[in-house]
Image: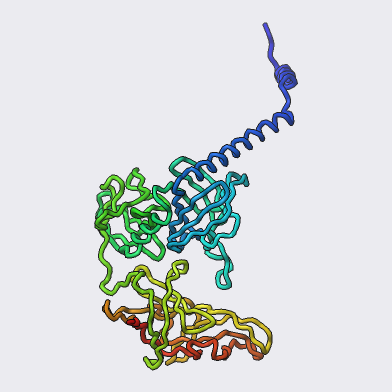
Amino acid sequence: MMSFSPHTALVAVMAAALLLPSCTHEQDDYFDQTATHRLQSKLDHTWQLLREAPYGWAMDYYPDRDLDYGGYAYAVRFDSLRAEVFTELSPGQSVTSFYSLQGDDGAVLTFDTYNTLMHFFATPSSSEYEAKDGDFEFVIDSVASDYISMHGKRNLNTVTLHPLSEPPAQYLQKVIALGEDFASSCQGTIGGQQVSATIDLNRRRLLYTDAEGRAQEHFFVFTDQGLRFYHPLYVGQQRIDQLTLSQQQQTLTSTDGQLVSLSPLPHDSLFVPYSQYEGQYYFSYFDGRLNPSVRLVANRFKGGFDMVGLSSKYNIFLSYDKNAGCLHLNPQMLGVYENPADGLRYAVYLMAWNSTAGNLTWTTEAGMKTVWNGSHEAPVYQFVTNDYVRFQTDSYYVSYPYVGDDGLTKLARLPSDWGVAGQVQVQKPVALIRRVE
């Protein structure tokens, strides 16, 4: 009878190991080459798809890792070397620059020469040294003929491409038209449950409470047909990626028309659409005694209007509240002043001022907002203190802070050409009064 011992087993195992082929450099190269070929195949396939879409691709772009801005509609048309970029933030404009597809921890699509539209959210400024946490380098995660999913190398946000069925400018015109006067609240059903939902247009998110009493938050981008979500909305096991607005703009529905059905509610009667503000005005202040002419110029990138005409050195920015349809005049940096006395450069601010108490602040939450008089023929937008309860703004002041010899922070007196219409005090703004030509 054959006997068995651990020693015999060990010898057998060692002998068998000697008969196994060793792991050679040739095999290492083989596996590396296979990975390289897989990556190159993905790059080639992606490059082919990008170029073959005749109208280009709709890009759902989400800056900021916390999604503070929601999503924005871009469109990109590719040839073999260049990408023509469009965005809802700059209607009627496109910018062409070079792009590349490279292997860098995976397949990466890079817009590698400066493009004012594609690089907007990633370009720092004196007031935003980290920009808006945007990306222009995207790691490609999955590729199909009708859908490309990527994520930003910097903020890791998902960015998706969808082939267009019409020219980019035409698609974005529809996106802008749909989102221009979109309701900020709606009622209806989600999964058969009656809900009252809020659509926060400033941060582009849908808010509601589900059947279990849990608060739901879904960020979205406007499309030519409705809303497309960053994370899908689930009703039970059913996944919903987008909602479509009916032709009569009466209902937002899921694809099946049943799981989600929301009816937008009308705006407040004093809601003013974005497109209604642009034009010529009198900026009435100092209790109506000063009324210089100004022009409001749309600045969709910043989400409001540049007020032009009060100074040769700067424009004053008015932000647009998409939920309320009003304008906000908040403290802001206006420019940089080089003091000839010390040769130093100082950031000049428009500060909020409570002229009764004599207090100043440059916190951007303070300020004033507009209220429309309701007239379409002779519109007037009256300035009132905004909802920031910690500071009651009734005026503004142009200056820059500095530290004096006594160690205390003080405000500098600027030359008159840095003032608003020659005055560093902007006392008691009354209204923007539409000029009738």
Name the residue nearer the viewer: 370 or 10.
370
What percent of the width, then of the height, locates residue 89?
Answer: 45, 63
Name the residue nearer the viewer: 35 or 144.
144
Q: Is residue 297 left or right of residue 137?
A: left
What percent of the width, then of the height, locates residue 143?
Answer: 49, 41
What percent of the width, then of the height, locates residue 11?
Answer: 74, 19
Q: Residue furthest top?
A: 1
Query: Do we see residue 218 in this rendering?
Result: no
Q: In the image, what residue occupies the spot 60% across and 39% down?
A: 40
Q: Residue furthest front?
A: 437
Q: Is residue 405 left or right of residue 184?
A: right
Q: Quadrant of the C terminus?
A: bottom left
Q: Quadrant of the N terminus?
A: top right
Q: In the image, what residue occupies the spot 62% across and 35% down?
A: 37
Picture layout, residue 90 above or below residue 407: above
Picture layout, residue 377 above or below residue 155: below
Query: Do we see residue 398 in this rendering?
Result: yes
Q: How many marks?
A: 0
According to the image, what is the colour scheme of the structure? rainbow
Name the residue nearer the viewer: 130 or 289.
289
What percent of the width, then of the height, locates residue 409?
Answer: 59, 86
Picture layout, residue 200 above or below residue 312: above
Res. 106 image quadrant: top right
Q: Is residue 283 left or right of residue 361?
A: left
